Image (cartoon, rainbow, N blue to C red):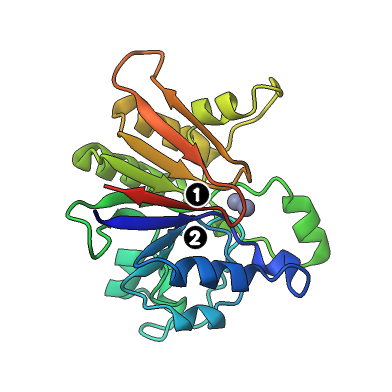
Amino acid sequence: MPKLRLIGDAHGDEKQGIYGPWDEYIAHAQGAEQSLMVGDLDFVYSRILVLDPEKHKVIAGNHDNYDKSSCASCNGHGCAACSHRGYVFCQQTPHFLGDYGLWTPPSFTEPLFYLRGGYSIDKHHRLARGFGWWPEEELTYQQAMRALQFYAEHKPRIVVTHAAPKTVKHALFTDNVEIQSSATEEVLDQMWQLHQPDMWFFGHYHRTWEDMLTPETGGGSTHFRCLDILEAYDLTI
Ligand SMILES: [Zn+2]
Ligand SMILES: [Zn+2]
């Protein structure tokens, strides 16, 4: 049975030299035929080059590097690759998937839908220290609306995103009724209300959690699964 290893947030930038998140991430990926990490990898990606970019992919989170300095193809003017993957991904490694879309892991026969980004609750801390925050951490309104339309057209069975729909976040944090939702969580919720995939995986909240949920307005059920930091989960289809 084809298997895809999903890997939770690494946060290589935060723990360098203390915890070895890169060692753990690479070991998880190399232990699997194919893998997908759900975001917040790091700000420097030289170590990922040991992994085959056809088999090991990354969805960008809110703690990834969105610096726009060196798209080799167009130097920031916008090229075909930019419009397909999103501008900042042209200068990242080929392991990065773009803003949103479909990816079929090499041994799968069906694609999964992905969408990057999320809101940094520690934005002010990151701005104060002078690095590690980018306005591109969430899709723009226009990008999000295009993503919503794309999702509605393709009605995927498997979804992997960095953040989770608003409703799911509320189910995850039942202990906090005051919890705020980000633009990303709102648009993911609109997607879920529109069409319920069988499975939906995400990271961002740094917890191991799962539940089967149905929208209040009715429809099908989705098995949601949150991955903790560097947690590995083998999805078999
Ligand atoms: Zn994270
Ligand atoms: Zn995150």
Quadrant of residue 104 within the rendered picture: bottom left
Query: Quick one: 122 or 211, which is closer to the camera?
Result: 211
SS for dot 1: loop
**Mark number displayed over residue 60:** 2
Give residue 98's position: percent from left, percent from top: 38, 62
Query: Quick one: 185 or 113, which is closer to the camera?
Result: 113
Query: Quick one: 62 or 136, which is closer to the camera?
Result: 62
Left or right position of 218 against 225: left
Residue at 65 percent of width and 30 percent of height:
180
Q: Badge 2: how crowded within 10 Å, few (<14), some, or many (20+)?
A: many
Q: CA distance from mark 2 to mark 1?
A: 7 Å
Tell me the residue that label 1 is attached to.
Answer: 162
Give residue 66's position: percent from left, percent from top: 55, 67
Residue at 66 percent of width and 49 percent of height:
120
CB within 8 Å, label 2 to label 1: yes
Residue 76, visible in the rendered structure: no
Ligand 2 contact, mark 2 (Cβ < 8 Å):
no
**Mark number displayed over residue 191:** none
Give residue 34's position: percent from left, percent from top: 35, 65
Ligand 2 contact, mark 1 (Cβ < 8 Å):
yes
Amino acid type of the residue that numbered disc 2 sits on in the rendered structure = Ala
Q: Badge 1: how crowded within 10 Å, few (<14), some, or many (20+)?
A: many
Residue 84, visible in the rendered structure: yes
Left or right position of 171 against 175: left
Amino acid type of the residue that numbered disc 1 sits on in the rendered structure = His
